[in-house]
Amino acid sequence: MKSGITSVVRSAVLTVALLGLFAGCASKSGYQQADKTGAGIDQFRNDIVDTKKAVDTTLSELGNITTEATVDPRKPYLRFAKSSARLESAVKKAQERAAAIREQGSAYFLQWEKDLVEVNNPEIRSLSHERKAELKEAFNRIGKAMQVANGDFKPFVSDVKDLEKYLGADLTVAGITAANDLIKKTKTEGATVQQSLDAVIHELVIVEAALTPARNK
């Protein structure tokens, strides 16, 4: 793991150097595009964190319905229904942000190609091509992690909505008891979703660090 982080840091330094060379050419748009993309990735990471919180709240309130089944499950059910709506909203926002990140990434690499035309040194040109390929692969890993997360989310959100409808119609001890198996299944799906979201966050942190020039604090 340490060697992997060291490689990322080394790559980040190389990126800054290359973008500095581009800035000395026709424009500064290369690193500015990198900043914009890096900022978008940071926002995307925050959206994923918010989605994780929504999943946590949904699972917690679902558990409260079971715990309070023999007392009064009305309040935890209403909280569960609200958390279910927030979960859908968080997922939608994250998906929209993911689409924006893909567009920004494409624009970033396109600008890189344009700036590279101004570079005459063949060694620097070759080095830049290698670095661009590394970053593209890093972006691809984000895409792959998101595909896994989306695949995990579909059955989870579907079961959450089904439970919301079912319990809304039969919020009784017998009704809750009958749904125990689906509740357990949904909790397991939620745990899987959390793991896949952690994988997305991991890739986002790596790309953001490799993409964004350091700033003095």
Image (cartoon, rainbow, N blue to C red):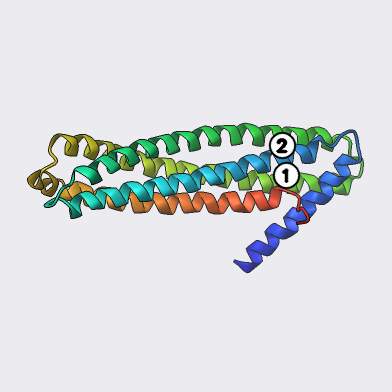
Which image quadrant is residue 43 in? top right
- Percent x, y for residue 79? 29, 43
- Percent x, y for residue 51? 44, 44
Q: Nearer the viewer, residue 193 or 173?
A: 173
Looking at the image, residue 29 lies above or below residue 186: above
Disc 1 element? helix
- Residue closest to the far bottom: 2
Q: Residues within 10 Å of mark 1 (few under 14, many from 20)?
A: some
Q: Residues within 10 Å of mark 2 (few under 14, many from 20)?
A: some
Residues at circles 2 and 1 in contact by the CB criterion of under 8 Å: yes
> In the rendering, which numbered label is found on residue 132?
1
Q: Nearer the viewer, residue 68 or 142?
A: 68
Q: Nearer the viewer, residue 24 or 48?
A: 48
Disc 2 element? helix
Q: Residue at x 38, y 44 (%)?
A: 152
Looking at the image, residue 37 lies above or below residue 188: above
Mark 2 and mark 1: Cα distance apart in space: 7 Å
- Percent x, y for residue 49? 49, 48
- Percent x, y for residue 142? 55, 45
> In the rendering, which numbered label is found on residue 109?
2
Which image quadrant is residue 132 in? top right
